[in-house]
Amino acid sequence: MAAAVLLVAGCGSGGAAGGSSGGANAEPIVIGSLAAYTGGTVDLNGVKKTLEAWGKSVNDAGGINGHPVKFVIKDTAGTPSNSLRAVQQLVEEDKAVAIVGQWDANFTTWASYVEKAGIPVIGGNPITTPLNNPTFFPVGGNVPGLQYGVAKEAAARNGKVAFIYCAEVPACKESVKSLEAVAPVAGAQLVASAPAAKSATDYTSVCETIKNSGASVYEMGVSGALAIRIAAACQRIGLTAQPVFIAGVSVESHATQPALQSLIEVDTNAPWFDKSLPGMKAFHEAVDKYAPLQGDENFPGAVGAWASAQLFQKAASLVQGPVTPDSIKKALYSLKDETLGGISPPLNYTEGKPSFFSCFFAYGVSNGTWTATEGLTPKCLPADVATQLQKSMAG
Amino acid sequence: MLPFIIAGLTTGSVYGLAGIGLVLTYKTSGIFNFAHGAVATVSAYSFYTLYVQLQLPWPVAAIISVFVLGPAMGLGFERIARVLARTPMAMRVAAMIGILLIVEGTALLIYGDGDTNVRTVPRFLGTHEFHVADIVFGADQLIVFLLGILATAVLYLFLRRSRTGVAMRAVVDNPDLLGVCGTSPVVVRRWAWMIGVTFASASGVLLVPFINMDSDTLTFLVVAAFGAAALGRFVSLPGAYFGGLVIGVAGSLATKFFTSGALTQLSASVPFLVLFLVLLVAPKRWLADHIRIVPPTQTSWRGPWQVQTLFGIVALAVLLFVPSFAGFRLADWTSFLAITIMFLSLGLLVRTAGQVSLCQISFMAIGACAFSHLAVGNGWPWGLALLVSGLIAVPIGALLAIPAIRLSGLYLAISTFGFGILLQYLFYQQDFLFGVLGYGIDVPMPVIPWLGQDGSPEPYYYLVLGVAVITTGLVVAINRSRLGRLLRALASSPTGLATSGASVNVTRVLVFCISAFLASVAGVLQAGAFTNVTSASYEPIESLVFFVLVIISPGGVPWFALMSGIGSTVIASYLTGVETGYILQIFFGIGVLVIALQPASKRGAPEWARTALDKLFRKEKPAETQHAAVEPAARREPAAVAPTVLQVKDLKVQFGGLIAVDGIGFEAPPGRITGLIGPNGAGKTTTFNSCSGLNRPTEGDVMLNGVSIARRGPASRARSGLGRTFQQMELFDELTVWENVAIGREAGRAGLNALQHIASTPSTKIEVDTATEDALRECDLLELADRRVDTLSTGQRRLVEFARCLAGPFSTLLLDEPSSGLDRAETARFGEILQHVVTTRGIGILLVEHDMALVTAVCDYIYVLDFGKPIFEGAPDEVMSSPLVQAAYLGGDVAVDDDSAAGAVTARGVR
């Protein structure tokens, strides 16, 4: 019903100045973030704690170029009018220079506002990132890129993919279209799709639809909690197709669900359980120290949030002089194949153009634990296919 | 196919259980429990706490949650329902929605929302799975299904066989009679509530292992029970259970057959589709509901115009300064102004016309979407796109008027609610509404240089303020115009309006169309404040809150709308915080409940304030005397009307197995008072209703001047010259005496023509005023012209109804017991009036009357009925001396003293 304001301050500064132009009393850099921490469709505690951990770790390490970071995180409670108000407040009242790691399903209500205001939106969830807005700077694959990853999984089996999407949110249904469009590119075909309402008491019929379609892989564009129910219902009727999630649906406990033992996650960033990549090592160290993630707070969204904050930090640290929305954007444009320590696909941004990344990381459950089943290197669409795809999807 | 059916039966069984609880409580108490889902939510969360959090054994948790909590909540509901039984339907609906909001808010506050705080209940009824051929189903599915059948059967037998059960059925038919027989209706209803609410509790507990805990989900699942109840015609318990099964199976099969295309959402829509269709096509007699939907304005008191003007200036001044302090909240303030327009549209529908819409937000969605497609998609100019977006909603408003034509009161409320949810499920996800990419739709602010609009928020705010002010003026004008009078008359008595000559269906369609247009415009303006909207901005549940706000907000136009707007947007903008939101919701729910439970006299401005304001501003001349002060003009003799003869031939009216009227024929020529008499139950009023088109004769004909009017509706017959009064008076209680009487003339002028409903020409106004004044003078009512009729004595009200008849251009008047409630002197005066108007106007009167003194004094010719059949006719003295007539009135062969026949009959037989 109303937005909550959670002030996660950089809590003062962390001792000695670490940069060239700042100091303990330097002007803080204000950034903002927003998500439906309540009233949304997913438990996003892992995202919030990661953003908090990043803020504290940065400030403890002396800030960015000596400037402490003040991170204002807002809860939109899932209401569209709250989203716009939250962003306007961040920009106009808090003077945030960037929106970082947002996960706001109502992003369309403020996308044109931030574009006009020239505020960069860095990282965040791919589902809540438009394909046609140059002020958004994703930290990994866009939805079509991830759908390409799903189709690739199907292509590696019998080439048939099905899709169960959430009945309540229009964007869920739209994902069907992007899967349908990219499937042939990957050598697969969308053979069935069915809506699943969270209020349904039984998913037998949905599962029968998938079973009858002969799909070898079925994507579930629903919340993780609902996905467990659906997978269990599908297992009950003897469905053997492998479930696939994209964009932060999976959580740690999915690995122990009997119905999800063949689960595959296709996501924007490196798997959250990896501790070998340099970027992932830093992530685990920070969250373990400042805001340890519990249970299902361990999920792809936490890494996404970390990557978003890291990208901002990278850009801000390149800024000579005052940190402003413009200087941040300029710094972002100057990046070349940035992977943030291996946790993102190579990132490049072009001024005035929407960013379209068609790379994905894929991993899955094996023997009851999450495993980097397909390695730790992102896979990408061929460049020409990606360009064609971008044109068709961006409308 | 079979797995789909099995899945559907499990869900359907739960719907059925909830439906049964709903029907039971509704039929016994007359209160339709919109909070039925909230009951299920409470029990479900209680079960979760006891079983999952406190780890009690599930049978203990279930017994506490269903059999302790259920009856306890039932007792609470019974107490509330007892108070609500004295309130209009709208207040009952509001109170139930209040409870819904309290429960939902509390659940959210304690447990958080279901998606971001995932809570699940294990399958406590067993996880064993049966494999039969290719089909797999769980033991719990089977148990739920069997429990549903068992509970229905037990309840059915209980109602048939047990004493309390029989009493519950009796309380539906006649609570007073039950009371006379020594069984307290209160106790019986208490039982019904306890059982009904326990059923809802059981459905909640049975549901939780199959879903993720979420108060929204639980509430809406049980809303599906509305559809089940509809299939049980809102009366039959097994019907409701079976209805639940049908809905469950149909929903499940829909997922099998509609896996792509526009109908993929059909499954979730099934309960609401069923609900809407049943209400749309079911025979009217299933759905008879005569309770007024809208609360009558509690008092005739209005703030003095000076105070209202002052408030208006202050409000406008504050609103003009908003951009200087609103900051980033300017969009919310703009949204507030837009939503005020929506509240004005809803107020016109609900407060003025007595209709109901629980789907007003859908029109806002339609407006925003249409506008985006026109202005952004096709590059139309802003103003034109706004206008056309409003017009696009008009036919959909007209569609919603169809249930309003067929239904009244509660069923209209439920059908519009179903309509709103149906729109959401079936259409919100279609590309043509919220766009292809799921990115919502853009609704830009206008760039119109000559209006100072440069596409930025501040000028836009002033533009919306301007539109809001214009809309306020428009709604005030409508309220004061002919349409306003017709709408208020419609709210008070559709029958009275129709029999005065206005085609009430035209009136209804008109108000739904105007309301849809304004709501659609409001939708565009609000969306413009945010520049981009998605379907999440238009949740159907919001419509319930809008309705409640319009019902409970005090004040007239525009005050109730402004207050509702502030309550729904501005407060939420400033009091942020998720928990604050939940707490606000709970307080709002409590407030609604408290207001609904208050006696009507305590709502609105407090007595001391009214007195003080009246003293200050109304010292010299109370407004009440405005018309009364009219100088009595020289007595005009009204123009005689074209004479008509009413003839009824071989009339037979049958209700099911009961023959109410059988073979009646008579003639009421002009210039004569014709009596139609007979003992109670003789069929007099039924005959009147056949004449004025309020019932459908099984056989026979009704003719005016030799032309059959049997196929025409009441309004058309009225326009042909047939006016009438009613035994149970059909006055427009919220209108003044003058306005009531004026409708007698004006309704016929409005007739079938929508344009003539809206406004009248100056010459018609003179005609209406003259006719009204003449009629009032004729009935000695001029002194009371500006009193509201609900403040008058019964005798005065009878005269007002008669005056309304006189004001109309009617050539034959059907008067149904017009002297009842009049004292001896008034009756004598009334008799003189009757004779005078017949002589001077050349009209014919058909008089049903029990006062034999009056009948014999004024009637020229009398027809006598008994048990629906004609038994005698003739001049008054012939009738009075007829042994047949005496026997009919007095029974057997009791002799009547010739000298005082009329008086004796009056004294002993009828009164």
Image: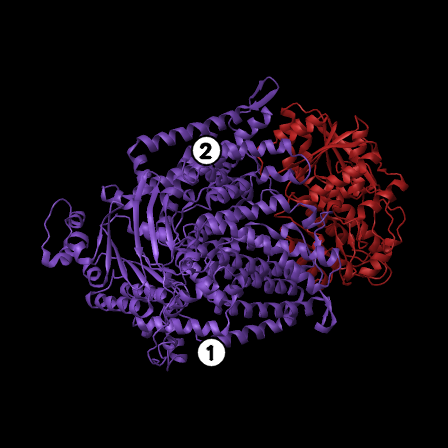
Chain colours: A red, B purple
Q: Residue at the spot x=62%, y=59% of the render?
A: B390
Q: Position of residue A138 (x, y in %)?
A: 80, 48
Chain to which mark 2 belongs? B
Compared with B435, B163 (above or below) is above
Spatial distance from mark 2 to mark 1, Cα to Cα? 58 Å
Q: Residue furthest top?
A: B133
Chain to which mark 1 belongs? B
Q: What crowding class fits label 2: few (fewer than 14 Cα within 10 Å), some (14-19), or many (20 or more)?
A: many
First in residue order: circle 2 vs circle 1: 2
Q: Position of residue B683 (x, y in %)?
A: 28, 48
Compared with B197, B806 (above or below) is below
Q: Position of residue B461 (x, y in %)?
A: 65, 68
Q: Which mark is residue B433?
A: none
Q: SS of the residue at dot 2?
A: helix
Q: What crowding class fits label 1: few (fewer than 14 Cα within 10 Å), some (14-19), or many (20 or more)?
A: few
Q: Position of residue A298 (x, y in %)?
A: 70, 39
**For the residue marked with disc 1, what is the amino acid?**
Gln
Residue receiving disc 2: B241
How many circles with numbers are drawn on the protein?
A: 2
Could you say which quadrant of the image residue A361 lies in? top right
**For the residue marked with disc 2, what is the amino acid?**
Tyr
Left or right for A161, reference A235 = right
Confirm or deny contact between disc 2 and disc 1 (CB under 8 A). no
- The answer, for residue B152, to whether it is visible in the render is yes
Compared with B775, B25 (above or below) is above
* Depth order, front residue of A226/B401: B401
* Depth order, front residue of B459/B779: B779
- The answer, for residue A376, to whether it is visible in the render is no
Left or right for B415, reference A138 = left
Residue receiving disc 1: B306
Could you say which quadrant of the image residue B628 lies in? bottom left
Q: Residue furthest front?
A: B706
